[in-house]
Image (spheres, rainbow, N blue to C red):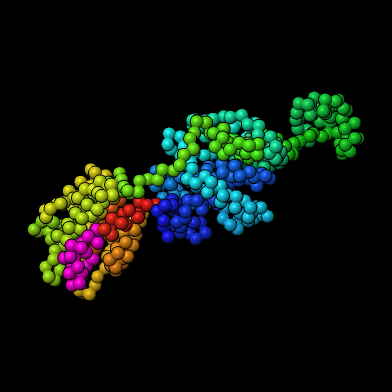
């Protein structure tokens, strides 16, 4: 059930292979448990609050209803859990990650979510890019050194709170072959007479004409070639020393942007509160409650063109057996629809508001000048068999936004007035093709069905149709 008090996310689920709707706070819980490193032994509740606020901020920043770009792969979703949007581990994976700490960490996260309800990090009233990393190793980074552009709140700050992090110092051994492969470089051939100098390690190699080593300096001390052969039990004095593995020492872990997780937890342990910690790592930000897009004006700033089909004496559209004409019914529906939509804040244009002839070209021109969010043509259907009834909708191939709008509207029409769903289909009608905006063609019902014809003469029924379309449009914009 959708409850207006909460914020819902549209997620493309990799497991279910479909879109799922989840409460924001539930996803915040999973993301927080995913992002807190298990390398922190003593996870402090204030640090958990920090991570909760980071997760919430990043989600809100991505959500379409807050003006975010959504998932770039599944354009109708806020995020997906495939990995490129955000990594989310669910129960099973989290149990594996946290082991015996699973229950206590999940409970602590739930408490932190309640304690920080609705809080996000903002700058100029917009949610920030709440970056973080495992261990900074002494100082975080200026954004321009990592992502190329200067972000006001991602400034370098000194941090030795992470001194006790197991990742303060790292060491990794990488084989020569791996380096060649990954960096796409080629080292010299490893022949026995290859000369390699490494200051302080191996230097001043002196060979005779046959390539035998006469003398060599190792670790700052001179040896004769024969001495080395003896001591290291080599087969010959014709040898060279070749690198096999490079050992790389590192300081810190992660890209150094934003908040240092081990540092932040340490700050919590010594008594800092979540807001102190956030303000320490993010320069000049504010912690604020989310402002929900206005509930009273759910269609604010949305521009819609409603296109009542046909019109004029020569273009009446289809006709019912009692003489009811499509052009009149669709004009009534469109006018009511305009009123309903405007009450919710939308800006609505009609391609005709009278019984007049308007060419298809003219309708397309009008729409392309206005450049609406949606262009919706309203029509009725007809068939020689009077028993046929039902609603059909058409969108242009590939226009998934119109398809989604059609689904929302159809859903409402079926629920509210019990129409028969005869399908949402692809078509290349002139207006679907020529109007640059997302366009939808709705055949409300069959005027050739006597029962339908009767209903369409009832102004209450007309209102119900217009209301259902309105609700469908609101539904579409809800997520
Ligand atoms: Zn995605
Ligand atoms: Zn640090
Ligand atoms: Zn028509």
Which residue sits at x=82%, y=34%? Answer: 239
- Nearer to us in this view, 330 or 339: 339
Q: Position of residue 317 (x, y in %)?
A: 15, 62
Position of residue 130 relative to residue 432, above or below, is above
Position of residue 275 relative to residue 304, above or below, is above
Which residue sits at x=63%, y=31%? Answer: 159
Give yes or no for residue 450 being in the magenta stretch: yes
Q: Identify the image quadrant of the N terminus.
A: bottom left
Q: Which quadrant of the structure image shows residue 225?
A: top right
Q: Is residue 34 left or right of residue 405?
A: right
Which residue sits at x=26%, y=44%? Answer: 371
Would you say the magenta stretch is mainly helix, strand or loop? helix
Which residue sits at x=87%, y=27%? Answer: 223
Q: Position of residue 22 (x, y in %)?
A: 47, 55
Q: Position of residue 348 (x, y in %)?
A: 23, 48
Question: Residues in magenta?
Answer: 445-466
């Amino acid at each position: 059930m959708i409850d207006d008090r909460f914020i819902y996310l549209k997620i493309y689920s990799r497991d279910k292979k479909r879109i799922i709707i989840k409460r924001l706070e539930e996803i915040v819980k999973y993301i927080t448990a995913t992002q807190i490193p298990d390398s922190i032994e003593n996870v402090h509740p204030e640090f958990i609050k920090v991570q909760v606020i980071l997760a919430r901020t990043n989600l809100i920043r991505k959500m379409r209803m807050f003006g975010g770009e959504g998932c770039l792969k599944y354009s109708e979703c806020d995020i997906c859990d495939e990995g490129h949007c955000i990594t989310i581990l669910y129960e099973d994976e989290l149990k594996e990650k946290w082991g015996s700490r699973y229950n206590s960490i999940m409970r602590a996260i739930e408490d932190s979510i309640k304690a920080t309800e609705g809080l996000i990090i903002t700058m100029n009233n917009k949610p920030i890019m709440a970056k973080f990393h495992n261990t900074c190793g002494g100082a975080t980074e200026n954004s321009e050194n990592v992502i190329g552009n200067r972000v006001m709140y991602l400034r370098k700050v000194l941090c030795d709170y992470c001194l006790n992090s197991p990742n303060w110092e790292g060491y990794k051994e990488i084989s020569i072959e791996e380096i060649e492969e990954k960096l796409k470089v080629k080292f010299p051939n490893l022949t026995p007479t290859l000369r390699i100098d490494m200051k302080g390690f191996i230097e001043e190699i002196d060979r005779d004409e046959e390539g035998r080593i006469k003398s060599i300096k190792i670790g700052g001390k001179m040896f004769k070639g024969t001495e080395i052969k003896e001591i290291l039990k080599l087969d010959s004095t014709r040898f060279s020393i070749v690198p096999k593995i490079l050992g790389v020492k590192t300081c810190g872990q992660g890209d150094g942007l934003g908040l240092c997780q081990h540092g932040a937890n340490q700050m919590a342990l010594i008594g800092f509160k979540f807001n102190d910690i956030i303000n320490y790592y993010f320069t000049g930000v504010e912690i604020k409650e989310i402002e929900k897009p206005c509930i009273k004006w759910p269609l604010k700033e949305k521009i819609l063109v409603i296109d009542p089909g046909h019109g004029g004496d020569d273009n009446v559209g289809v006709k019912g057996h009692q003489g009811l004409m499509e052009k009149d019914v669709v004009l009534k529906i469109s006018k009511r629809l305009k009123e309903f939509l405007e009450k919710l804040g939308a800006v609505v244009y009609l391609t005709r508001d009278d019984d007049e002839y308007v060419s298809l070209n003219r309708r397309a021109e009008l729409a392309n000048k206005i450049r609406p969010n949606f262009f919706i043509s309203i029509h009725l259907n007809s068939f020689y068999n009077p028993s046929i009834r039902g609603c059909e909708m058409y969108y242009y191939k590939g226009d998934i936004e119109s398809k989604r709008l059609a689904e929302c509207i159809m859903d409402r029409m079926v629920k509210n007035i019990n129409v028969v769903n005869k399908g949402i289909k692809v078509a290349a009608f002139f207006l679907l093709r020529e109007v640059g905006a997302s366009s939808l063609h709705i055949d409300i019902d069959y005027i050739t069905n006597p029962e339908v014809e009767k209903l369409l003469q009832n102004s209450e029924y007309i209102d119900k149709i217009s209301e259902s379309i309105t609700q469908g449009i609101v539904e579409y914009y809800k997520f």
